[in-house]
Image (cartoon, helix red, strand yellow):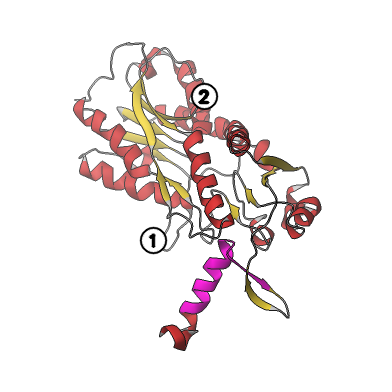
Amino acid sequence: MGQLFGTTHLTVNRALKQLMDEGLLERKRKVGTTVRALPTSRTIGIYVPHNFLSSSGSNYFILLTFKLQEMIEASGRHAQIWIDTRSPQEHHHPLPDLQRAAEHREILGFAVPIIGAWEYPWLRQLPVPIVGPSSLREVRSPVESDYDQLFQSYFRILKQRKLQHVALITPFPRPKSKKELLEWHKFFEPYDDNLRDFDLKTRREWEITCAPPCDHATYGRHALLELWKQKQRPQALVVYPETVVLGVLQAIWELGPECWENLQLCLHRNESSVLPVPFPVLWAETSVTELAKCLLRSLDARIEGRIAPSRTLLPFAKSKKNPASPPLPKKQP
């Protein structure tokens, strides 16, 4: 094939691997690589690892699961949900019922709310297409968050209000090198770029990241309490994602008006989340509906043997200020 198309065997192997990942080809031992036959089933599977449902982001994963189910059934197909209740250590091995359904072609393909490191090795071996967001470098996720747009929407308003000093609370670890390509590492480059573009200032001690494994809400609360102990405080605070926001809001209530009257909050929330606060907040919202649409559009293309759409940047809803209007943060001298 390399000679036929005037390229190297490495390029051919990469192309074949991509076609297999997209569900267009399948490789069988002692048979070879063949074009995958179109299944006749009308069922789409949804696989949900139970450890994510019991995590700090459980509301998000539950909402995405039900959005996927709703859209699949609205298209005239059947949605079958597998919730993997095994211990995390057992997630290294295929879920027997799911594997059997895939091998017997009872399922057209699978949508997964989150593809984790433990499940990915066996999920990619299933003989049907799989799509889902993931932080893993080797997963070709069809959608990723548009962090550049997120920070632009925040920082443009901060610049207009002449709020120059910005802090950040996130559980994502800052990359040690540019070679690290995990999803959350794409968070920091647009953050740094937009700070520079809008001529905003920060300090190393104002960037609270890389939490050890723990409850995100607990982490968010402790992070803000530590930040507020510092002699020099920021005028604005970016908190991402929503799971950390819950703890930050708890800490703000504990600190009282001195905190919320002197700190512009730039917070993230997911679609349909209700986080009422009586002080001004710039909200950026993730549309779970749009995420589900992107995943199913990519899955349908792979099922039908078409080239899957290119990766979609999922924008955040425009930042909004809460109706309440206490005094805006005071400018530092």
Dot 1: element:
loop
Q: Nearer the viewer, residue 104 or 134?
A: 104
- On the image, the x and y values in percent for residue 324 come to 36, 11
- On the image, the x and y values in percent for residue 49 come to 69, 45
Q: Nearer the viewer, residue 315 or 177?
A: 315
Please give left or right for residue 330 compared with residue 105 in the image: left
Cα gap from disc 2 to disc 1, whole angstroms: 34 Å
Name the residue located 32 percent from the left edge and 28 percent from the top edge: 236
- Per the image, the residue denoted by label 1 is 178
Task: Estimate how packed mark 1 is, as few (under 14), some (14 to 19) or many (20 or more) residues with alpha carbons within 10 Å.
Answer: few
Q: Which residues are magenta?
A: 11-27
Up-down relation of residue 57 to residue 89 (above or below): above
- Per the image, the residue denoted by label 2 is 273
Please give left or right for residue 116 compared with residue 309 in the image: right
Name the residue located 65 percent from the left edge and 64 percent from the top edge: 37
Q: Which residue is outermost to the bottom? A: 3
Name the residue located 62 percent from the left edge and 47 percent from the top edge: 112
Dot 2: element:
loop
Query: Earlier along the polypeptide chain: callout 2 or callout 1?
Result: 1
Q: Amino acid at mark 2?
A: Ser
Select label 2 or label 1 by which is in front: 2
Up-down relation of residue 223 to residue 136 (above or below): above
**Are the two marked residues, 2 and 1, in contact with CB atoms closer than 8 angstroms?**
no
Q: Nearer the viewer, residue 46 or 204?
A: 46
- On the image, the x and y values in percent for residue 7 come to 42, 83
